[in-house]
Image (cartoon, rainbow, N blue to C red):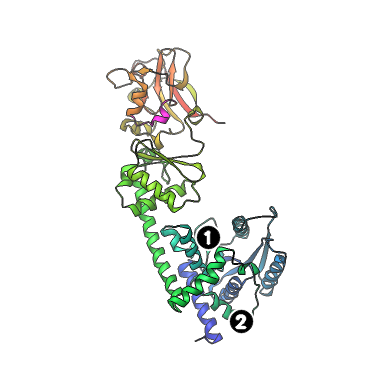
Amino acid sequence: MSLDPVDLRRKLLRSVARNLEERCRVARGSRLLVGVSGGSDSVALLRLLVDLAPELRLELAVAHFDHRMRPDSGEDAAFVRALAAEHALDFRLGTWEGETVRSETKARAARHDFLIRTARSHACDAIVLGHQLEDRIETVLMRLGRGTGIRGLVGIDWRVEQSVPLLRPALDIRRSTLCAYLHSISQVWREDPTNRDRTKTRNRVRHVALPALGEALGDRWLENWGAALDDLADIRRWLGAAADALLEEAASRTDVAAGASRLPSRSLQRETLRSAPEGLRRAALQRWLEAAGCTDLTRHHIGAASDLVANGQNGQEIVMPDAARLLLERGRVTLLAPSATETSEAFAYELELEHVLPTAAHAATAGRPVGDVAGAASTGVLLDGGVLPEPIEVFVAADDLTLPIEARAARPGERVHLLGAPGSRKVARILQDRCVPARLRRKWPLVADSRGIVWIAGVGVAERCRVRADSRSALRLRLVRARG
């Protein structure tokens, strides 16, 4: 039975107000930018927000983006402008300025960028959009069709954290209910004829799948599914917190030593991930890869990454979106950027020298690297699968060094007697024991004089170069990654 117009309005106002404060976490007195397309959903939400503004002390502004995808799109913009003026609201218009032919993805991205820029320029606390219950269910069904995990199953979020938060306070309200409300207050809206084009997946879901499901499942199926999605969102948040804790545990110890307090590390300990339940491991890997910049991840990508951790062989790698590579070696899983290669470009260092007077402090360090990396090197664990911190430096005795002194890679078969070692060993074997990946050993930076190796970066100095109590002079060796 349909509600009386007064009761309908009162019910919708209560629902939107509750959702704003509880689910969208909007503080009273906030300034909100309302994205209005001119369609029924966004127009209904704007009218409800206008009525709620005095009670919640909201300051509203209206934004519309003209995609220019239809000849009459300018009429939509004029309609929204007039609606904003009718309620004495600030209005901002954005217009597509790109090529004539565009995809819906590009158009959506352009609208999003416009809303963010506008919200920032007007010091808005959040952006509000008119998505409703059917939008949420349609999105879930489309993602199921493409293949998705637990995050995709949640559908559209009430609040999306970004530079300016994105809010959707009407996600539990049916489209038909919003239209009934507009009819009850004699408010017109604009109809987009492309919404009837059944060659588009969303329109087929909207006009074919949803009615069929309603006929099969009963009147309350949409609301019941929406409530289940909220429960699933709570589970996702819990799983996300557990995944972050797993990533913290799996991060390389030397990331912590170097002061890296934020995820993601580029290298994670395999055994920590492998010992976790598969669902948690998959969630952690997805969060790690996305935080590292891997976009367009699918269920297939996450499954392949999880299988690599669980069952992969040393040296095995898989390709992620954007040509990034996930590599398994020496007990770690490492994410390599598309440009990461085995060439000298990835590990080109410049050497800086500074003469200093030797002190007791220099002698006490016994030539160890300056800073926390010394402790990391003593454990045989190096940063992020082999990438050194910048800069890295040591003090060495200058008495017996002979020119030239240079930064370079090890030569085939080259040996060195490191401080504290019983004798000389091949550099390749030393790096192997220090867990430097095989792909990096040939280009690992070291410093040498005319007599041989003085210092292997991140590993140790030669016995002959230690600063002693009777050393007459010392050198500060500093390696800095070459720029450009």
Q: Residue furthest left?
A: 422
Report x, y in % for residue 41.
Answer: 58, 72
- Depth check, front residue: 195 or 87: 195
**Quarter of the image where the C terminus is located:** top right
Report x, y in % for residue 399.
Answer: 40, 13
In the image, taking residue 189 as reference, residue 157 lies left or right, namely left
The amino acid pointed to by label 2 is His
Q: Residue at position x 48%, y 42% from top?
A: 324
* Among the two numbered marks 1 and 2 on one chain, the one whose residue lies closer to the N terminus: 1
| Alpha carbon distance from label 1 to label 2 | 31 Å
Helix, strand, or loop for circle 2?
Answer: helix
The picture quadrant where one finds residue 311 is top left
In the image, taking residue 71 as reference, residue 297 lies left or right, namely left
In the image, taking residue 283 as reference, residue 404 lies left or right, namely right
Helix, strand, or loop for circle 1?
Answer: loop
The amino acid pointed to by label 1 is Pro
Q: Which mark is residue 165?
A: 1
Badge 1: few (under 14), some or many (20 or more) residues near its Cα, within 10 Å?
Answer: some
Badge 2: few (under 14), some or many (20 or more) residues near its Cα, within 10 Å?
Answer: some
Do labels 1 and 2 touch, CB within 8 Å?
Answer: no
Say if the magenta span includes residue 76: no
Report x, y in % for residue 185.
Answer: 61, 82
Q: Residue at position x 55%, y 31% from top?
A: 483
What residue range appears in magenta?
434-442
Residue at the disc numbered 2 = 183
